[in-house]
Each structure stands twice: as C-alpha cells, then as structure tokens.
Image (tube, grey):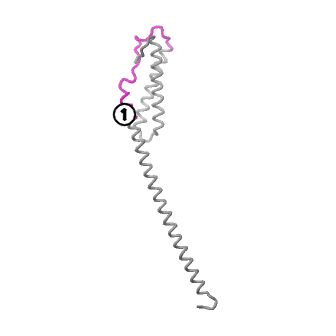
C-alpha cells in the first residue's frame, strides 16, 4: 500500500465505476422490458377493440340486411288522401329520396373497413329518423288510423 492511499482510492473509484455501469445496464434492461410489456399490452388492447368493433359491424350488417327488403316502399298515390296538400306529397317524395341516399351511403360505409363505427351509426340514425318521419307523413295523408307501409 502506498503511503498516500492512492491505491485504495483507485480501487474505490473502479468499484464505484463498475457499480454505476451495472446500475445503468440494469436500468436499461428494465426500460427495455417495460417498453416490450407496454407494446404487448397495447397490441392486446388493440386486438380486443378491433374484435368488438367487428362484432358491432356484423350486428349492424345483420340488422340492416333484415330491414332492407321492402324497407323503402313508397306510398301509393291512389291510397293517399285526395285532399292532402301537394306540398305534403312533395315532402314525402323528397324524404323518400333522402332515405334512399342514406341507405346507399350506409351500404358504402359498411363495406369500407376504414370508416369509424360512430359514422355508420350516425348515418343509420338519420336513415331511421327519416323513415319514421315518412311514416308520420303517410299516416297524416291517409286520414285513417293505419300507417301506409
């Protein structure tokens, strides 16, 4: 041992340097593990959400396919109240054209996998709202207690 203790100081310095390197390696190892775990969890969540969205889309398609046949049946002009204002008959015609447009848009959106489910539901809601509006107008133009569907 040297009288000034430089050997001891050097040994202590090297041990400290070695322990810092081990700490840094362990920290980097932990960071890599945490990043891998986070990515794995995100992938799992992504798959779960995608499966849920696909199930919702399948349900909407099923409901749509059940309702499409005969869902847009124009009211027969001869069955309407002869005293119904022409403006009301024109409104029914315009509304039926809107429903047809919503139906076409819905078919296009359902076929496109990149479209958000909220957009599909929004268009479907508008379509159903217009159909209900038309039923109300037809009911009014019939002048009876039965809807014209």
Residue 24 coordinates in the image, percent (x, y) = 53, 70
Left or right: 20, with 101 as reference point:
right
Task: Count the marks.
Answer: 1
Residue that badge 1 annotates: 62
Q: Residue sitting at 43 percent across and 32 percent down?
A: 106
In the image, is residue 140 part of the stretch drawn in magenta? no
- Looking at the figure, which quarter contains the C terminus? top left
- The spot of residue 114 in percent (x, y) is 44, 42
Q: What residue appears at the point 46 percent right and 22 percent down from the top-left corner?
A: 132
Q: Is residue 136 above or below residue 22?
A: above
- Give the side of residue 4 with respect to residue 22, left or right: right
Query: x%, y% of residue 119?
Result: 48, 36
The magenta-colored residue range is 60-87
Q: Is residue 76 magenta?
A: yes
Looking at the image, residue 82 lies above or below residue 16: above
> What percent of the width, then of the height, locates residue 127?
45, 27
């Amino acid at each position: 041992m040297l009288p000034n203790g430089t050997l001891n100081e050097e040994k202590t310095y090297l041990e400290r340097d070695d322990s810092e390197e081990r700490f840094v390696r362990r920290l980097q190892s932990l960071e890599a593990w945490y990043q891998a775990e986070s990515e794995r969890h995100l992938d799992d969540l992504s798959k779960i959400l995608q499966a849920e969205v696909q199930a919702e889309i399948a349900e909407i398609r099923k409901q749509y396919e059940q309702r499409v046949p005969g869902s847009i049946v124009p009211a027969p002009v001869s069955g309407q109240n002869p005293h119904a204002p022409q403006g009301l008959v024109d409104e029914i015609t315009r509304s039926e054209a809107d429903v047809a447009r919503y139906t076409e848009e819905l078919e296009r959106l359902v076929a496109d996998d990149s479209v958000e489910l909220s957009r599909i539901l929004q268009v479907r809601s508008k379509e159903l709202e217009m159909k209900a509006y038309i039923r109300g107008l037809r009911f009014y133009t019939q002048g009876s207690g039965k809807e014209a569907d």
